[in-house]
Image: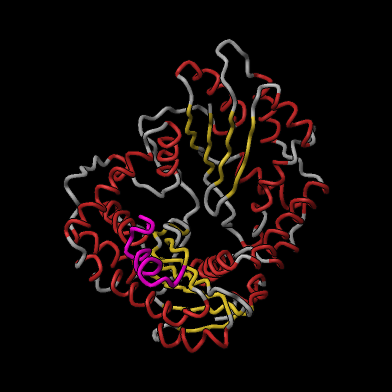
Amino acid sequence: MQIQVVVPTGFEVRDAKDAGIANLFADILDSGSRSLDRQAFLDRLSMSGASASFTVSNQYSYWTLNFPFEKNRSYGELGATLAEQWASPRFTEESFGLAKLKLESALKSGLDSDGSLGLTTIRRLMNKRYFSGTPLTLDVLRGLKLSSLPAVWDRDYVNARDVFAAVVAPAEAEPAVRALLSAVFAKQGAIEVKREPSRLEARENSAKGHKAEKTFVIVDKPGRAQSYLSVVGVPNERLDADDEIAFQFGNHVLIDSGLGSVFGDEIRNQRGLAYAVQSAPRFYLGYPGLGVITNPVREKSAVALDLVAKLLNDAYVSGEILRQLPPDIWARQWKSFVYGRALDTSTPAGRQAERVAVATGTMGLKAYRAQLDGDRPIGRDEVIESLRRVWRKGAIVATVVGEAKELEPMVRKAFPDFGVRVIPYRETLNAKTYETP
């Protein structure tokens, strides 16, 4: 059985002085608890056949427990072990030093992954410029002190107002589940069982500094065989509940249906410009996202940049791509979308993931409740307008990773209405880079 608990806080901080702290918590918890080092903690869990994990995203954090349920077994000791870890993580110089070292290694290793490098540069720039945030960089990380961690942990995690739990378990496991949740998340009070999930109240990220402007960053990294290209548009308004299905289906047709998608077919199958074609992250800090990520071969960078610019315009500005799609393909894509969604929720784990999506705001209740008919496709105008609303209100940031002197004239030709910046790839880890307009 599995219990997954969502806590409505993450590494997106309320105050710049807390920047980077929550990024360390997953490794701190992995080191054990105040009285148990990592091996002793794992040994205690193994007595119940259990495993626990903890991850932190920008707005939410996820505590997950897996263990084999036995009807007549007591889980009091397991609950006590997990409760101590949650209330008193192993905040020692050793665990803190190791967590910092691992996070620094992860940041530096991101410089070697061109795809990750481009996308994280976009996120950091958007965070700083449009949401008044403090992105994680090496200088932020190196300034962290152990003494700052316990207060942030107690405030944002132990004393979180509410948490959301999604459970995959037999009905007879309910008393054990309640006992475990009550032991670990004691500060949240009584457990409320709901027929439908509801969104947790996470820290709101203001988009008041958000502008519908376009920026293209060339991450200068010579000697690349490919030019990783990422384009992401994020609006200054959240997605309307009435737009959600149209927004999801539009992305399915354009990119998310793999090599059968419009972008995948055109970029890879028809032109052979790149091996990978995928969608940009669908949400950033609670706001919807549109765009594409692809890896054109260096020799074909100019053609690829021109094509991506045209595809983005025809998909998100004029809507001509969707308007001209033959009726049989539109109907087939709709069936694929509807049946894919049904397949995703055909297992307990899939239904759990859907409930978590509602709790974290990446799916609204209207979409959650929607009963879609595979034989009755959604209207084209509805889909086109949904995508256009997001794109035209968006701050659009693009990156391409490669040789700047080669790429800059190509970028300026393909994206003439974008402001262009060149950043040496190592400088993407410096806070000062994102303070420069």
Query: Which residue is at the front of the view, 323 or 52?
Result: 323
Residue 327 in the magenta stretch? The answer is no
From the top left corner, tell me how far across and down residue 307 is, in percent: 37, 77
From the top left corner, tell me how far across and down residue 161 is, in percent: 53, 40
- What residue lies at 33% left-to-right and 73% top-to-bottom? 311
Query: Which residue is at the front of the view, 255 or 146?
Result: 255
In this image, 28 relative to 247: left or right?
right
In this image, 369 relative to 177: left or right?
left
Residue 313 vs 49, above or below: the answer is below
Query: Which residue is at the front of the view, 406 or 241?
Result: 406
Q: Name the main secondary structure of what is drawn in magenta.
A: helix
In this image, 286 relative to 248: left or right?
right
- What residue lies at 53% left-to-right and 36% top-to-bottom? 5
Residue 138 vs 44, above or below: the answer is below
Which of the image's four quarters has the C terminus? bottom right
Residue 263 in the magenta stretch? The answer is yes
Q: How many marks?
A: 0
From the top left corner, tell me how far across and down residue 315 is, in percent: 29, 69
Q: Which colour scheme is used?
A: secondary structure
Q: Which residues fall within the magenta stretch? A: 256-274
- What residue lies at 65% left-to-right and 57% top-to-bottom? 18
